[in-house]
């Protein structure tokens, strides 16, 4: 005979809500939003992975349908599948999502459009085999990145008894935040004064560069002064604004304190000057917008999915035409096209081609640099007067070797790692980047 251990005097407690660990182990509760996400997952995944790449590949053009073309199509579809996984995941993986968004557009769809049309923004000077090798190495690097992510899934064992200590929330120290805010105002004010006042920030990026050169912080081959001036003039202001925004979102005390609201409003005004889309590169303004979005909505899966999906649309339709403020009125040339493929073939997406040029450059004599280029990037702030043999930027160095007038050319991480350490070092470097990105994304989630 079975015995009921419950007693009439004790009321059964309601079941505890599932913890994030429970949800990860047993799956989330099915809600209308979950069902909607599942219903949209199939067309989204097929759109990124199959429909868009095949649609681009099927367009008419003067390109060759050789090994490089088909390998580029495979790379685009692989990146599309991984980007779809980032959009549809239950966790917000900001670093991994950004990585696959870049790969999908800059190393996938845009080079595929260039392969179809037979036109590139930067000439590929070497043989076709170097381009094929570059595409294959990018695919190898993407695979290594995924291996690093898989290795990061192995969490360290918990404490005795299987229990793990609940992580404490990350807090910002108020005095340190005030110090950061003071530094932000001082650095941004120095940046504004050095360039001649706020008006120049609403003219064009060409005027900003001219102002930096007139200020005497960018001359010859040295770019350290320009990088430091722009970095300290823009980054502390952005970080302070994000922290104050998060404080106002989470704290009733902050929303009742006039000094906090006034400081936040002043930081907003400061960022409108130094971090506006007119005087800053498109990738930096996109960074500012995404940072603000995920500061306001840090745990919204819907917002994360919408942002990542819309970024593809922006990269396809807006970015190629968004350089209106790069040049002044005399030097600006509007894009005239009848096809959505042409802007991607004519504008800034030169990463695959420049990787191929880097391979040709190394094969022409210099070979690999075994960490020299990486040292130049790490110690970029050391002036050339102190370090006469300081390496030039890889894109600039390859562009000068090619004889191009404009040496402001791309050098993706694949090219940097390959030029320094060869294919094995490139694979190991991207594996480490994937591992680090997964760990950081987990901590953020």
Image: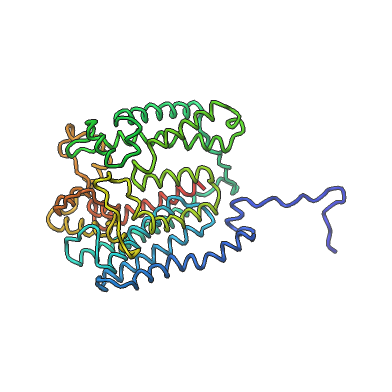
Picture quadrant of residue 29? bottom right
Whether 374 is drawn above or below 229: the answer is: below
In the rendered image, residue 272, in percent from the top left (x then y), is placed at: 42, 37
Seen as rendered, the residue at the extreme right is: 8
- The residue drawn where x is 29% and y is 31% is 195
Q: Quadrant of the N terminus?
A: bottom right
Whether 399 is drawn above or below 204: the answer is: below
Left or right of residue 318: residue 85:
right
| Camera-nearest residue between 198 and 355 | 198
Q: How is the image coloured?
A: rainbow
Whether 46 is drawn above or below 9: the answer is: below
| Camera-nearest residue between 3 and 391 | 391
| Camera-nearest residue between 193 and 94 | 193
Left or right of residue 47: residue 24:
right
Total numbered labels:
0
In the rendered image, residue 444, in percent from the top left (x then y), is placed at: 49, 46
In the rendered image, residue 75, in percent from the top left (x then y), is placed at: 34, 65
- The residue drawn where x is 33% and y is 61% is 110
Left or right of residue 38: residue 378:
left
Picture quadrant of residue 115? bottom left
Left or right of residue 323: residue 29:
right
Picture quadrant of residue 83? bottom left
Seen as rendered, the residue at the extreme left is: 365
In the rendered image, residue 280, in percent from the top left (x then y), is placed at: 34, 42
């Amino acid at each position: 005979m079975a015995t009921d251990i419950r007693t009439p005097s004790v009321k059964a407690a309601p079941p505890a809500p599932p913890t994030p660990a429970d949800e990860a182990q047993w799956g989330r509760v099915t809600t209308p939003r979950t069902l909607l996400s599942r219903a949209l997952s199939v067309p989204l995944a097929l759109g990124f992975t199959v429909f868009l790449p095949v649609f681009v590949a099927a367009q008419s053009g003067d390109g060759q349908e050789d090994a490089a073309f088909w390998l580029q199509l495979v790379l685009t579809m692989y990146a599309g599948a991984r980007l779809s996984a980032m959009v549809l995941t239950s966790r917000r993986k900001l670093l991994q999502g950004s990585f696959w968004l870049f790969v999908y557009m800059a190393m996938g769809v845009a080079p595929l459009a260039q392969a179809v049309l037979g036109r590139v923004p930067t000439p590929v000077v070497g043989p076709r085999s170097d381009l094929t090798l570059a595409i294959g190495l990018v695919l190898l690097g993407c695979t290594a990145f995924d291996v690093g992510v898989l290795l990061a899934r192995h969490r360290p064992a918990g404490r005795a008894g299987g229990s793990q200590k609940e992580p404490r929330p990350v807090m910002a120290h108020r005095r340190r935040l005030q110090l950061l805010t003071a530094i932000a105002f001082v650095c941004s004010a120095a940046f504004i004064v050095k360039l001649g006042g706020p008006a120049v920030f609403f003219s064009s990026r060409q005027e900003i560069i001219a102002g930096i050169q007139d200020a005497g912080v960018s001359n010859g081959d040295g770019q350290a002064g320009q990088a430091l001036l722009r970095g300290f003039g823009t980054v502390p202001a952005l970080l302070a604004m994000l922290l104050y925004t998060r404080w106002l979102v989470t704290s009733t005390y902050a929303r009742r304190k006039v000094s906090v609201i006034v400081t936040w409003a002043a930081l907003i005004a400061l960022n409108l000057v130094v971090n506006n889309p007119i005087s800053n590169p498109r990738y930096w303004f996109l960074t500012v917008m995404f940072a603000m979005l995920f500061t306001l909505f840090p745990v919204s899966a819907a917002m994360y999915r919408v942002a990542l999906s819309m970024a593809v649309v922006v990269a396809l339709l807006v970015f190629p035409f968004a350089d209106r403020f790069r040049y002044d009125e005399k030097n600006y040339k509007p894009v005239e096209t009848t096809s959505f493929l042409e802007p991607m073939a004519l504008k800034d997406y030169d990463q695959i081609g420049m990787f191929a040029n880097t391979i040709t450059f190394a094969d022409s004599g210099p070979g690999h640099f075994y960490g020299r280029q990486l040292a130049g990037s790490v110690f970029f702030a050391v002036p050339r007067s102190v370090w006469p043999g300081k390496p030039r930027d890889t894109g600039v160095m390859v562009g000068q070797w090619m004889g191009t007038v404009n040496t402001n050319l791309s050098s993706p991480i694949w090219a940097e790692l390959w030029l320094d350490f060869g294919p094995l070092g490139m694979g190991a470097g991207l594996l480490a980047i994937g591992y680090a990105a997964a760990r950081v994304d987990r901590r953020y989630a």
